[in-house]
Amino acid sequence: MANDASAVFDTLSPAVSNGSLADPFTPPADSSLWRKNFLLGAATASYQIEGAVNEDGRLPSIWDTFSATPGKVLAGDTGAVACDHYHRWEADVEMLASLGLEGYRLSIAWPRVMGAAGLPNRKGLDFYKRLLSRLKEKGITTSVTLYHWDLPQHLEDRGGWLNRDTAYRFADYADLMSRELAGTVDAWATLNEPWCSAYLGYGNGHHAPGLANDRFATQAMHHLLLAHGLAIPVLRANDPASQKGIVANIGRGTPNSDSAADQRAAHLFEVQHNAWILDPLLKGAYPQDLFELWPGTEPLVLDGDMQTISAPLDFLGINYYFRTNVASDGAHGFRDVPLEGVERTQMGWEVYPDGLRDLLTGFKRTYHNLPPIYITENGMASDDKVIDGHVDDTQRISFLKRHLAAVDQAIKAGVDIRGYFLWSLMDNFEWAFGYERRFGVVHIDYSTQKRTVKRSAELVAKFLKERKARV
Ligand code: IFM
């Protein structure tokens, strides 16, 4: 974890490094965040930052196809260039290290590293080998996600996640990656946010591949979770020293009133967002309430699948962003009732740190085998502008402080939380919202690719430097 402390601050503004700027970020003295073994890092994902979609033998992914389809992505943006990280990775690693960030969560683009016949694409693999080796040289803990939504298009052409065979192809991919990259990866996550892949990709069509059918969503989810379960033993065999887990996005649903119907609606919201993924992983069964919400959508499950899916995990990655206030829809489900007068981000998402604490403590009560947790994503989008060379992202600073306080509260309530990754290291391609929504702690000028460290990143760096200096 040992970044060279002297490197920290190299990129920081004098107001921060000489202490003349008021510090609205640093956690209070009794916060668990001061523990040196609490990992603090940043996250990105391949399609959102790499660009270079046609280089070195990379094959098309479902997001190349989807973003090239008119009307699917705001302003017609695509990931073709993104942050040009494929070419600028060395400078980006320097930036990460100069901020003192201790961990980096990245994802591998499956279509960059594996051909349609399952053979390795050496040039693509070499990119990740160089990147991961450099991160290790810098003392940065590496957390690698195998699937952050960029499914090879040739697999989608054969049914994608609706085809059970895709789960076996994923296990082959996990096998190749863990044989090639063993020793440079501290933690492997199989999937990022299967809820988004299954529901947004196959249930409402807002994400690639753009299909919209609840029955498709539950079957795609089953195959995604099966892919995860098949990959875990492969990763264990090939890279025994690393941690293995999965990353789930979770949502807080609160009832609009005390009525039994609204309470039930909030329960169903959380079943659909959380238990749909966590129950199969941690209890080996789908929550039956899900099929009350979506009658007749039970996936086809073969003998042994649920045991495969519920193989023990070394960690669970949790991504949290906001809560949703809901009421009964008068039938089987819930409807959103947006609250007035609450703080929101550029995405329109409500800022609600208590939701993170409440969900984490709730999971500890619900799942007796809850693995150690990493917050693998948390952050917010704001319409950040560079003014006189600086980005004053005051809302983000406050957002991060409050969510880290919620993490501290959950730790103090007994939840085993080992680390936190900011989403995101840099502004990037925000899926259906293109480049308009800026989640980074580093600003990207997409016309020049200039990186500007935002105030939030400076304050995180300042805290990390102080923590490191403590005896
Ligand atoms: O940008 C995404 C990321 O790819 C997955 N989790 C949510 C982020 C913000 O929407």
Image (cartoon, rainbow, N blue to C red):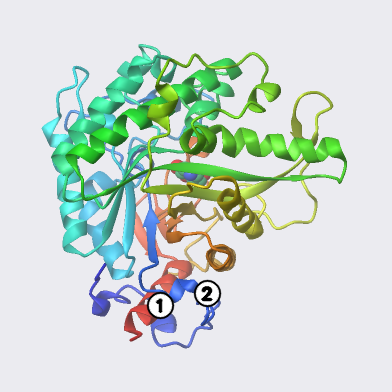
Tell whether label 1 touches label 2 (CB within 8 Å): yes
Q: Is residue 166 left or right of residue 392?
A: left
Q: Residue furthest right?
A: 259
Dot 2: element: loop
Instruction: Judge by depth and name the residue closer to the eye, 49 or 318.
Output: 318
Q: Is residue 371 left or right of residue 200?
A: left
Name the residue that disc number 2 marks.
25
Q: Which quadrant holds residue 234?
A: top left
Q: Residue at x 86, y 46 (%)?
A: 258
Instruction: Judge by depth and name the residue closer to the eye, 427 or 183.
Output: 183
Mark 2 nearby-residue class (10 Å; few <14, some 14–19, many ≥20): many
Can the viewer see residue 332 in this picture?
yes
Q: Residue furthest front?
A: 368
Dot 1: element: helix
Counting residues from the start of the chain, the first of labels 2 and 1 encountered is: 2
Which amino acid is tagged 2? Phe
How far apart marks 2 and 1 lie (CA) works out to 9 Å
Q: Residue at x 24, y 40 (%)?
A: 236
Q: Residue at x 24, y 52 (%)?
A: 89
Can the viewer see residue 75 in this picture?
no
Of the 4 image quadrants, the one containing the C terminus is: bottom left
Q: Which mark is residue 141?
A: none
Q: Residue furthest top?
A: 158
- Image coordinates of residue 255 in percent, x first then y, are 78, 44
Name the residue that disc number 1 marks.
462
- With respect to residue 149, does 323 lie above or below? below
- Image coordinates of residue 348 in percent, x first then y, are 65, 47
Q: Which quadrant holds residue 150?
A: top left
